[in-house]
Amino acid sequence: MNYLEFENFNLYFETPILKQMNPTQILFLIAAYFGVLILISYFTGKNDSNADFFKAGKTSPWYVVAFGMVGASLSGVTFISVPGWVDGSQFSYFQVVLGYMVGYFVVAYVLMPIYYRLNVTSIYEYLNQRFGFVSHKTGAFFFFVSRVLGAAFRLYLVAIVLQQFVFDEWNVPFEITVVISILLIWIYTNKGGIKTIVWTDTLQTLFMILAVILSIYFINESLGWSFSEFLASSELKEYSKIMVTDSFLERSHFIKSFVGGMFITICMTGLDQDMMQKNLTCKTLKDAQKNMVSFSIVLVAVTFLFMLLGALLFIYAKKHNIATPLMDGTPKTDLLFPEIALNSGLGITLAITFMLGLIAAAYSSADSALTSLTTSFCVDFLNIEKKPKDQQKSIRKKTHIGMSVMLVIVIIIFKYVLSSNVIDSLLTVAGYTYGPLLGLFAFGVFTKKQIKDKYVWIVAIISVVLTAVIGNIPAESLGGYVVGYELLPINGLLTFVGLVLISRKQD
């Protein structure tokens, strides 16, 4: 999932829409779901070693990793928002998805050989070997900030769901709900770490895909269509435009969307410890590359299913005169999927399917984020591999607890000091932080120059500030040009130029 998909998702959770299922039913569903996850954790975490926690002992089957990564890449945001976007943008989001696919090939055949050759636990160790101490810490810091914000926000959404639809009924404070949410994740990730995540993500991906497929099936059945009839229908043609090529000034122009999607993938998969940690659990580089390529194909197919579902939702709504739900008096298309799934009389099976898909989508991103934060902090900041062997497991366990406590604190801060608009802005800023990583890795891979390592953090900060300034230039000042997905490569380019300016002759 990328940071751009967070937009408007929080609005869904502020709307009391899940009235078809009572709090006890929802809690029972969540309890059963986590019972299965904890059972998986029991079998995968028996060894409880750092090697398993960080790299799963490099024994993960590539096809399991590939399937599980689909769920980790998507999220509750994708689950709700992608179908909702179809009304306004039709299938134009697929332009970005095609860019993703190219980006995954770059990750597989440019970045992953480097990581495997160096046998790294944290991918930011590459920066230490290539440039030095400050570059390593700068890269790890920017990842850490991004993941703390992103993970906290994902878990914030989960906590709001539990609070509004379960614990408010029993007058349980929000703070306790947050602790329970993170405790659930901590329980099944504490021992097995990434080894557990590889398998739980597989289950969660399965729930997500089943939710989409069953939703399409039930809605088509109610319309009296087969799937092939739906694909051939004139109604679908109203929503199925993919290519936007009218004006380059548009945010969603094909070139801007495609290139932006490619760089989003390179940064948010290839330069992200959360995503790459799963790939590093494969036995060999060849297996990891097979994982990445097959994962990209499945992800494209699943995303297309989400867009088909979106078109079907709006077709169904028109035929049955279902209005788009309102939020603060404004129609919010993100709310149409839950409205139809839960309140349109299509039955409890679809309601349960939707809830399972939503829970799976939310936690599949959050659990891997917590594990990757623990890994990055242990390796990049605590240098755990240089500590005495008998202390390493204790350090990892304490760090895992520390990361959990930190997320609790950040989530509670979100609750009391941030408005929805501020949250959106905060996540956009978090997306900017991948720019310095892009610039650092690009400079390291594509040049042989050395840099004055001590100045790298200054270059990174200036790059982020300049990118934020560029992103806030009014379109009128740019001749109507709307800055969109290309901000990330711009950020990376600024960092790259800055590194050129502080480069030095090779020793």
Image (cartoon, helix red, strand yellow):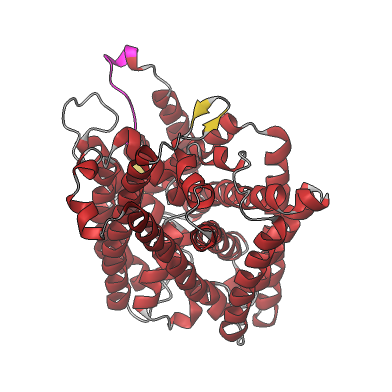
The residue nearer to you, when weighing 338 against 428, is: 338
Above or below: residue 18 compared with residue 200:
above
Say if the magenta span includes residue 108: no
Nearest the eye: 486 or 504:
486
Q: Answer above or below: position of 475 versus 191.
A: above
Q: Is residue 472 above or below residue 319?
A: above
Whole-percent x, y for residue 396 in the image: 65, 71
Give the percent coordinates (x, y) of residue 28: 68, 67
Judge whether residue 479 is colored magenta: yes
Q: Which residues are magenta?
A: 476-485
Which residue is at a point 49% across and 48% down the rendered structure image?
344
Location of residue 322 (image quadrant): top left
Count of numbered labels shown in the rendering: 0
Which residue is rendered at x = 54% and y = 60% of the image?
Answer: 348
Image coordinates of residue 208 in percent, x first then y, are 44, 62
Query: Which image quarter is the C terminus in?
Result: bottom left
Between residues 58 and 42, which one lies in front from this camera angle?
Answer: 42
Q: Is 419 situated above or below 182?
A: above
* Residue 315 in view here: yes
Pick the residue in front: 482 or 354: 354
Q: Is residue 451 visible?
A: no
